Amino acid sequence: MSLFTRKTETGLQGSLYDVGGQKTLLIVGLGNVGKEYTDTRHNVGFACIDSFSASQNFPAWIEKKDLHCIFTKGSIGSTTVILIKPTTYMNESGRAVQAVQHFYKITNSQMVVVHDELDIPFGQIRTRVGGSHAGNNGIKSMIQYCGEDFARIRIGVKNDLAEKMDGADFVLAKFVGSEKKLLPQLEREVSAILSEYTATTTLPHDTRTISNPN
């Protein structure tokens, strides 16, 4: 039995880009650089694109200081896929993404951002194009530098502790207990969404929920 349920949302379907058969996709994972931030809720975007990079056998990550990011690039079918993790820290993520967009001439319609979202329960993954930043400072910076019309894979991190803690402290804390056990499944599901997108050039607009197997 599948550990995921899927609910399709209507009204947002359609290809984000398809230019003469030559496709380039920029996938951005949001997070903070530094060992102290590893495995924190705010870094789930980094973790998910690390998992996707490994599943697709991308080259080793390299630092691009002039573009303010950690970078790798590969091909999936006929699509050139660029993966980045900004090194500007979360609050200035947009500055790094804008630099990469300008250098590679990539538009918002060719970009997907993978990030945590405090308003969504842990275990849910939602996708959409555009919208507000919902309190995520990384997305707020992205909107400031790049506009708001980019695709997003929003990974829920909310749990019962969220209402008892300051929001900033909560997202900078590490995943706990059963969350840790489910993280590999969550990362695989995000990788599946990204694989589907790179294959079809259409972002699957839906909600996917991890079911606890215990």
Image (cartoon, rainbow, N blue to C red):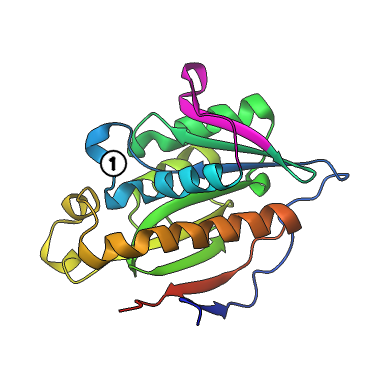
In percent of width and height, residue 132 lies at 45, 58
- For image coordinates 54% across by 78% down, the residue present is 6
In percent of width and height, residue 44 lies at 37, 51
Q: Which of the 4 image quarters holds residue 7?
A: bottom right
**Residue 58 on the magenta segment:** yes
- For image coordinates 47% across by 28% down, the residue present is 70
Q: Quadrant of the C terminus?
A: bottom left
What secondary structure is found at the residue carrying circle 1? loop
**Residue 64 on the magenta segment:** yes
Q: Say what amino acid the circle numbered 1 marks.
A: Thr
In percent of width and height, residue 74 lies at 66, 35
In percent of width and height, residue 146 lies at 54, 40
How many residues crowd around disc 1 within 10 Å: few (fewer than 14), some, or many (20 or more)?
some
Residue 143 in view: no
- For image coordinates 19% across by 55% down, the residue present is 170
Please name whichever residue, 193 or 101, is drawn nearer the observer in this view of the structure: 193
Q: In the drawing, does residue 118 fall left or right of residue 60?
A: left
Please name whichever residue, 79 or 131, is drawn nearer the observer in this view of the structure: 79
From which residue to which does the magenta span run? 57-74
Residue tagged by mark 1? 38
Residue 81 vertical position relative to residue 7 in the rendered view, above or below: above
